[in-house]
Image (cartoon, helix red, strand yellow):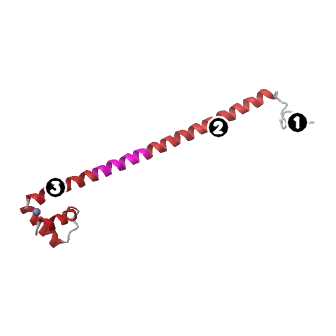
Protein backbone atom coordinates (compact mmCIF):
# COMPACT_ATOMS: atom_id res chain seq x y z
CA UNK A 1 0.00 0.00 0.00
CA UNK A 2 1.28 3.43 -0.87
CA UNK A 3 1.40 6.36 1.57
CA UNK A 4 -1.37 8.20 -0.26
CA UNK A 5 -3.75 5.26 0.05
CA UNK A 6 -2.76 4.70 3.69
CA UNK A 7 -3.29 8.34 4.60
CA UNK A 8 -6.77 8.31 3.11
CA UNK A 9 -7.64 5.42 5.43
CA UNK A 10 -6.18 6.83 8.64
CA UNK A 11 -9.36 8.51 9.89
CA UNK A 12 -11.37 5.36 9.30
CA UNK A 13 -8.70 3.24 10.94
CA UNK A 14 -8.69 5.56 13.92
CA UNK A 15 -12.43 5.05 14.34
CA UNK A 16 -12.16 1.33 13.62
CA UNK A 17 -14.42 1.64 10.63
CA UNK A 18 -12.24 0.02 7.99
CA UNK A 19 -13.20 -3.36 6.61
CA UNK A 20 -10.93 -6.03 8.20
CA UNK A 21 -8.72 -6.51 5.14
CA UNK A 22 -8.10 -2.81 4.60
CA UNK A 23 -7.51 -2.40 8.31
CA UNK A 24 -4.77 -5.06 8.31
CA UNK A 25 -3.12 -3.61 5.20
CA UNK A 26 -3.17 -0.08 6.60
CA UNK A 27 -1.72 -1.25 9.92
CA UNK A 28 0.99 -3.10 8.01
CA UNK A 29 1.83 0.11 6.23
CA UNK A 30 1.97 2.02 9.51
CA UNK A 31 4.44 -0.53 10.92
CA UNK A 32 6.75 0.04 7.96
CA UNK A 33 6.27 3.76 7.37
CA UNK A 34 7.27 6.17 10.12
CA UNK A 35 5.86 9.15 8.18
CA UNK A 36 2.33 7.74 8.06
CA UNK A 37 2.70 6.49 11.63
CA UNK A 38 3.56 10.00 12.79
CA UNK A 39 0.56 11.36 10.94
CA UNK A 40 -1.67 8.70 12.50
CA UNK A 41 -0.43 9.54 15.99
CA UNK A 42 -0.96 13.24 15.36
CA UNK A 43 -4.48 12.56 14.13
CA UNK A 44 -5.16 10.39 17.17
CA UNK A 45 -3.96 13.23 19.41
CA UNK A 46 -6.22 15.69 17.66
CA UNK A 47 -9.29 13.47 17.96
CA UNK A 48 -8.53 12.83 21.60
CA UNK A 49 -8.32 16.58 22.12
CA UNK A 50 -11.60 17.09 20.26
CA UNK A 51 -13.33 14.50 22.43
CA UNK A 52 -11.93 16.18 25.53
CA UNK A 53 -13.11 19.60 24.33
CA UNK A 54 -16.54 18.11 23.62
CA UNK A 55 -16.67 16.67 27.11
CA UNK A 56 -15.65 19.97 28.68
CA UNK A 57 -18.28 21.79 26.60
CA UNK A 58 -20.97 19.32 27.70
CA UNK A 59 -20.00 19.66 31.35
CA UNK A 60 -20.01 23.43 31.01
CA UNK A 61 -23.46 23.35 29.41
CA UNK A 62 -24.75 21.12 32.22
CA UNK A 63 -23.30 23.44 34.85
CA UNK A 64 -24.93 26.38 33.08
CA UNK A 65 -28.28 24.58 33.01
CA UNK A 66 -27.97 23.79 36.73
CA UNK A 67 -27.16 27.39 37.56
CA UNK A 68 -30.08 28.62 35.41
CA UNK A 69 -32.40 26.26 37.28
CA UNK A 70 -31.07 27.50 40.62
CA UNK A 71 -31.54 31.11 39.49
CA UNK A 72 -35.16 30.58 38.44
CA UNK A 73 -35.87 28.76 41.72
CA UNK A 74 -34.48 31.73 43.64
CA UNK A 75 -36.52 34.17 41.54
CA UNK A 76 -39.65 32.12 42.15
CA UNK A 77 -39.03 32.16 45.92
CA UNK A 78 -38.47 35.93 45.79
CA UNK A 79 -41.68 36.44 43.77
CA UNK A 80 -43.63 34.43 46.35
CA UNK A 81 -42.06 36.32 49.24
CA UNK A 82 -42.86 39.70 47.63
CA UNK A 83 -46.45 38.58 46.97
CA UNK A 84 -46.73 37.53 50.62
CA UNK A 85 -45.36 40.86 51.79
CA UNK A 86 -47.74 42.75 49.47
CA UNK A 87 -50.71 40.80 50.80
CA UNK A 88 -49.53 41.44 54.36
CA UNK A 89 -49.14 45.18 53.67
CA UNK A 90 -52.60 45.32 52.05
CA UNK A 91 -54.10 43.55 55.07
CA UNK A 92 -52.45 46.02 57.48
CA UNK A 93 -53.63 48.92 55.35
CA UNK A 94 -57.24 47.62 55.51
CA UNK A 95 -57.01 47.25 59.27
CA UNK A 96 -55.58 50.77 59.60
CA UNK A 97 -58.20 52.49 57.42
CA UNK A 98 -61.23 50.67 58.74
CA UNK A 99 -61.74 50.53 62.52
CA UNK A 100 -62.41 47.07 63.96
CA UNK A 101 -65.99 45.90 63.59
CA UNK A 102 -66.93 48.38 60.88
CA UNK A 103 -66.18 46.07 57.98
CA UNK A 104 -69.14 44.78 56.03
CA UNK A 105 -69.67 41.14 56.59
CA UNK A 106 -67.97 41.17 59.98
CA UNK A 107 -69.83 38.43 61.87
CA UNK A 108 -69.32 40.20 65.23
CA UNK A 109 -71.15 43.27 63.85
CA UNK A 110 -73.96 42.16 61.50
CA UNK A 111 -75.52 44.90 59.37
CA UNK A 112 -78.87 46.14 60.73
ZN1 LIG B 1 3.40 5.91 4.46
Question: Residue 10 got which mark?
Answer: none
From the viewer's perspective, is 63 left or right of 44?
A: right
Q: Is residue 97 magenta?
A: no
Image height check: is 107 above or below 20? above
Q: Which mark is residue 110?
A: 1
Crowdedness near tag 3: few (<14), some (14–19) or many (≥20) residues, C-alpha within 10 Å:
few
Spatial CA span between label 1 and label 3:
92 Å
Residue 17 percent location from the top left of the image:
23, 67
Circle 2 sits on which residue? 83
Mark toward the start of the polypeptide (2 vs 3): 3
Farthest residue to the front: give it. 4
Instruction: Please determine whether, in this image, residue 102 is positioned above or below residue 17.
Output: above
Viewer-closest of 5 and 69: 5
Instruction: Identify residue for label 3.
Output: 41
Judged by its main secondary structure, the magenta piece is helix
Q: Position of residue 52 (x, y in %)?
A: 28, 50
Compare marks 1 and 3 and give the one earlier in the sequence. 3
Q: Residue at x 40, y 48 (%)?
A: 62
Name the image quarter holding residue 13: bottom left
* Quadrant of the snapshot with the N terminus: bottom left
Q: Which residues are magenta?
A: 51-64
Q: CA distance from mark 2 to mark 3?
A: 63 Å
Q: Is residue 13 left or right of residue 75?
A: left
Give the spatial CA distance, label 2 vs label 1.
31 Å
Amino acid sequence: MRCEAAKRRLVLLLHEELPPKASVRTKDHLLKCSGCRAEFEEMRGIFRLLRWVGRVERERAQARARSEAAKSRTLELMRREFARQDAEAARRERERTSPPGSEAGDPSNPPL
